[in-house]
């Protein structure tokens, strides 16, 4: 079953066309990886899945993005309702300058949960879900900025999980982290896909091949090839893809 | 022989060059030191004139206070320099300054901070340029103009509403609330703009609205900058003189209502300094010393907040 | 609090702020500009014709003289603090704190000091000299602070490049640092002169309020702002006060625009 279906999506920043005729299905409870050289449009596409590109001036979108069968660019719900269901984790860990607890509780509080007990449960569940509970359970009242980068990123993942999204978008979630933290997050992603649909952008091809089920290769704002990950990396259909995954790309 | 001469000439040339070079270097180093000396003298002059002024105010003010009695001066409620002997209690003026400044802060703070929020998070870029210039203009308009405007507009309005002369504490609060707006707005706006954009995006990505994000992420993150702006605004309000003297009524009494006249520490000085002599003059300098202490306290508070942030 | 209410509060506050400013400026313009007659710009102030020309010229004289003294002293002080003194020295941080404090001291304190020290103690009487020297101390902290900020904003790589070419400290300061920092320094100077132009509390009992053009350094005069204060507090010539106010606002707008333009040139140059 497909969680998200993208049909003929074109996107412009002012005069510049950043995405051309994107067609892609994102299956439920799988990890979909976007790979490709810098500036090829993969971050742009991931941002257009929860409409974070609304924040960019002069950004124009044509085509459809169906989430659970509804076009997110023509829906009647406010965009905040969409972002509640499609969570996002950023390249740089970006915890708020608040305590760890308040960071994770921020989303649920925004959406109207005030009861302390319920919040406690959500915070613990989310931090456990992000595999960081054991490390921070005694320092929940300390500033989220005081822990390591890897822990910050997992707190940000917990913060995203706390609003109970259906999809998690991750824009190069490990590019700012050390190898040990990266391994922890990769393991976490594999565990998360049981309950969530995950879309991630990565520069690291080993990472894509290790943890994703489906991979899309981007070049110059177009998807060159999409396939099951093991096939795309071993028997790509297009020469360009083969060049890129084997590292022969200029 | 000729050959030798040539050699000598060459050597002479070289000697000359080294001498010139040395001379130039000596000149250069002399100039460097001279100018460094001049810069240093300027620094010493600036600092000593500043220090001298502080010393002057305190050294002429404190003897009077100790002679007259610290408690009598600070807690006395009667200011009557023309009595014999004159009584110099500045409590009414201290209370006046605190009340007027407090009221101005109550008016100016919410409006100022929310306007800064508007500038930083709501205002379209085309409008922003104009509004930014407007805030700068607001900061640069001389206080006498604010005072004159209040005299011609707020005072008659107050007269209609509250009766009396219209020159009262409420008028002063409104006027000062208006005057501290540019300080609060421009510094709070700068603090809000310094909040990393990733906080904003992080919050939106959790499905939070723009409004909630601004209020529960950006404003708390800019908290210390916003507090500093309010402290500086308070400093401006407590130090304002000529605008207040036009519209506050200036009675040296402890105000008993929002619509009673009021005299502040600053206006107390300016009202009487033209003719004060002897003890009376010393009492005014002592008033300035107390005002200075108020400013020092406000400034230390400001430095404390700034340090905590840095 | 609902999002809607937050939004309403934000828009309302911004509305109040800018409506108040616009209203105040328009109020003074509408009531003042009709009275801006040629008479107001005649050479002599008389009881029949309260000309503002003498005070306008006095303003220029006072501002000019003040800058002439304060600008070099202030700028050189910043040179010393930023380019020579050791960055970690306690002395420098003490100076910096003193300067910060002085920038927050109310003008009336400067006025009182100026009156007692220059006017009475040194026997200058109400005079241009006393007014200017009081203004000098008042704007020194402003000039030092803005110049320091301007110097700090010049990247160290520029200084290193100049030293790397064998230039001395002095040459580096005057040929490399100063040109790069000049627009910001100038805009600081202009804002400082704005403070003198608008000043009343510090000048009333130092410069005095004589209605005539000062005949020398030791003769009294009044600046435009003082002129306006006297007109406003006497309450006899309210129309003239409005007209003077309009001139004052125009002056402030011009000064602000120049300062903004200058600081924008810095931004452009650094971007390049």
Image (cartoon, grey):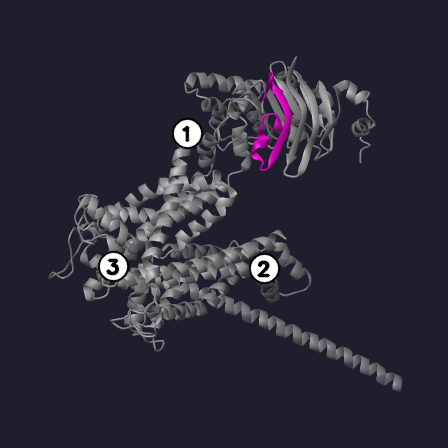
Q: Are marks 1 and 2 in contact (CB under 8 Å)?
A: no
Chain to which the residue tagged by mark 1 belongs:
C
Magenta span covers which residues?
A48-71
Report crowding for label 1: few under 14, some 14 to 19, many 20 or more residues within 10 A (C-alpha). Answer: few
Neighbourhood count class around disc 3 (C-alpha, 10 Å): few under 14, some 14–19, many 20 upward: many
Secondary structure under tag 1 reads: helix
Q: Return the residue at label 3.
A: B269
The chain letter for the residue carrying disc 2 is C
Look at 45% across and 16% down and name the residue there: A118
The verdict on residue C12 being magenta is: no
* For discs 1 and 3, the disc positioned in front in the rendered view: 1
Closer to us: A250 or B264: A250
Q: Position of residue A249 (x, y in %)?
A: 80, 33
Q: Position of residue A59 (x, y in %)?
A: 61, 35
Task: Decide: is A199 above or below B86.
Answer: above
Chain of residue at mark 3? B
Q: Is residue C133 above or below residue A139?
A: below
Please report whichever mark, 1 or 2, sits nearer to the chain's N-terminal start.
Answer: 1
Image quarter (top left, top right, bottom left or bottom right) of the N terminus of chain B: bottom right
Residue at the spot of label 2: C180
Whether residue A64 appears in magenta in the rendering, the answer is: yes
Residue in front for this viewpoint, C245 or C198: C245
Residue carrying label 1: C4
Can residue A214 be seen here? The reply is: yes
């Amino acid at each position: 079953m497909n969680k998200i279906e993208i049909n003929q999506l074109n996107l412009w920043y002012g005069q510049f066309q950043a995405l051309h005729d994107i067609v892609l299905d994102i299956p439920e409870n799988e990890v979909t990886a976007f790979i490709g050289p810098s500036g090829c449009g993969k971050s742009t596409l991931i941002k257009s899945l929860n409409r974070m590109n609304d924040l960019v001036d002069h950004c124009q979108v044509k085509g459809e993005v169906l989430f659970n069968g509804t076009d997110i660019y023509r829906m009647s719900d406010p965009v905040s309702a969409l972002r509640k269901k499609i969570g996002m984790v950023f390249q740089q860990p970006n915890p708020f300058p608040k305590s760890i607890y308040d960071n994770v509780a921020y989303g649920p509080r925004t959406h109207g949960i005030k009861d302390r007990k319920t919040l406690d449960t959500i915070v613990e569940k989310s931090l456990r879900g992000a595999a960081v509970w054991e490390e921070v359970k005694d320092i929940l009242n300390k500033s989220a900025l005081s822990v390591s980068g890897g822990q910050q990123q997992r707190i940000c993942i917990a913060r995203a999980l706390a609003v109970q999204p259906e999809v998690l978008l991750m824009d190069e979630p490990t590019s700012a982290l050390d190898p040990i933290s990266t391994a922890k997050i990769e393991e976490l992603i594999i565990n998360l896909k049981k309950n969530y649909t995950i879309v991630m952008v990565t520069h690291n091809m080993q990472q894509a091949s290790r943890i994703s089920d489906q991979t899309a290769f981007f070049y110059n704002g177009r998807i060159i090839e999409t396939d099951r990950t093991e096939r795309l990396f071993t028997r790509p259909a297009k020469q360009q893809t083969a060049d890129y995954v084997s590292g022969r790309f200029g | 022989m000729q050959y030798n001469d040539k050699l000598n000439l060459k050597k002479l040339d070289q000697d000359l060059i080294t001498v010139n070079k040395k001379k130039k270097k000596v000149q250069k180093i002399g100039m460097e030191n001279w100018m460094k000396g001049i810069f240093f003298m300027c620094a010493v002059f600036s600092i000593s004139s500043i220090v001298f002024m502080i010393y002057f105010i305190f050294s002429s003010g404190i003897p009077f206070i100790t002679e007259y009695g610290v408690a009598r001066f600070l807690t006395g409620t009667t200011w009557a320099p023309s009595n014999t002997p004159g009584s110099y209690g500045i409590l009414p003026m201290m209370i006046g300054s605190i009340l007027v400044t407090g009221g101005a802060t109550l008016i100016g703070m919410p409006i100022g901070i929310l306007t800064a929020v508007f500038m930083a998070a709501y205002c379209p870029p085309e409008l922003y340029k104009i509004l930014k210039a407007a805030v700068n203009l607001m900061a640069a308009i001389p206080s006498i103009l604010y005072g004159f405007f209040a005299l011609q507009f707020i005072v008659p309005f107050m007269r209609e509403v509250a009766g009396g002369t219209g020159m009262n504490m409420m008028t002063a609060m409104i006027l000062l609330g208006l005057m501290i707006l540019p300080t609060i707005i421009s510094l709070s706006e700068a603090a809000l703009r310094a909040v990393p954009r990733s906080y904003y995006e992080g919050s939106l990505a959790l499905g939070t609205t723009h409004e909630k994000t601004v209020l529960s992420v950006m404003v708390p993150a800019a908290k210390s900058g916003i507090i500093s702006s309010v402290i500086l605004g308070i400093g401006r309000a407590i130090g304002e003189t000529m605008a207040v003297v036009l519209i506050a009524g200036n009675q040296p009494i402890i105000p008993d209502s929002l619509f009673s006249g009021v005299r502040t520490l600053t206006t107390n000085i300016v009202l009487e300094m033209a003719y004060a002599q002897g003890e009376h003059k010393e009492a005014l300098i002592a008033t300035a010393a107390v005002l200075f202490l108020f400013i020092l306290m406000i400034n230390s508070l400001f430095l404390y907040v700034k340090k905590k942030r840095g | 609090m609902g999002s809607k209410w937050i939004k309403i509060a934000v828009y309302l506050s911004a509305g109040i702020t800018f409506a108040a400013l616009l209203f105040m400026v328009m109020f003074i313009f509408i009531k003042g500009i009709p009275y801006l007659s040629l008479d107001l710009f005649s050479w002599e102030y008389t009881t029949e014709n309260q000309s503002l020309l003498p005070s306008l010229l006095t303003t220029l004289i006072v501002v000019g003289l003040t800058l002439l003294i304060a600008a070099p002293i202030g700028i050189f002080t910043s040179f010393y603090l930023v380019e020579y003194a050791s960055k970690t020295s306690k002395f420098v941080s003490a100076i910096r704190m003193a300067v910060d404090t002085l920038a927050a001291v109310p003008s009336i304190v400067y006025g009182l000091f100026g009156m007692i020290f220059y006017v009475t103690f040194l026997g200058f009487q109400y005079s241009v000299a006393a007014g200017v020297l009081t203004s000098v101390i008042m704007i020194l902290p402003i000039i030092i602070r803005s110049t320091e900020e301007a110097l700090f904003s010049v990247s160290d790589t520029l200084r290193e490049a100049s030293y790397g070419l064998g230039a001395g400290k002095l040459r580096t300061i005057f040929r490399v640092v100063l040109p790069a920092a000049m627009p910001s320094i100038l805009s600081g100077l202009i804002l400082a002169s704005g403070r003198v132009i608008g000043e009343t509390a510090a000048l009333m009992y130092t410069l005095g309020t004589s209605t005539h053009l000062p005949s020398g350094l030791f003769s009294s005069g009044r600046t435009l702002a003082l002129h306006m204060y006297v007109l406003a507090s006497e309450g006899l010539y309210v129309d003239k006060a409005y007209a003077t106010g309009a001139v004052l606002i125009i002056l402030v707008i011009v000064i602000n625009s120049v300062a903004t333009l200058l600081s924008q040139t810095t931004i452009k140059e650094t971007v390049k």
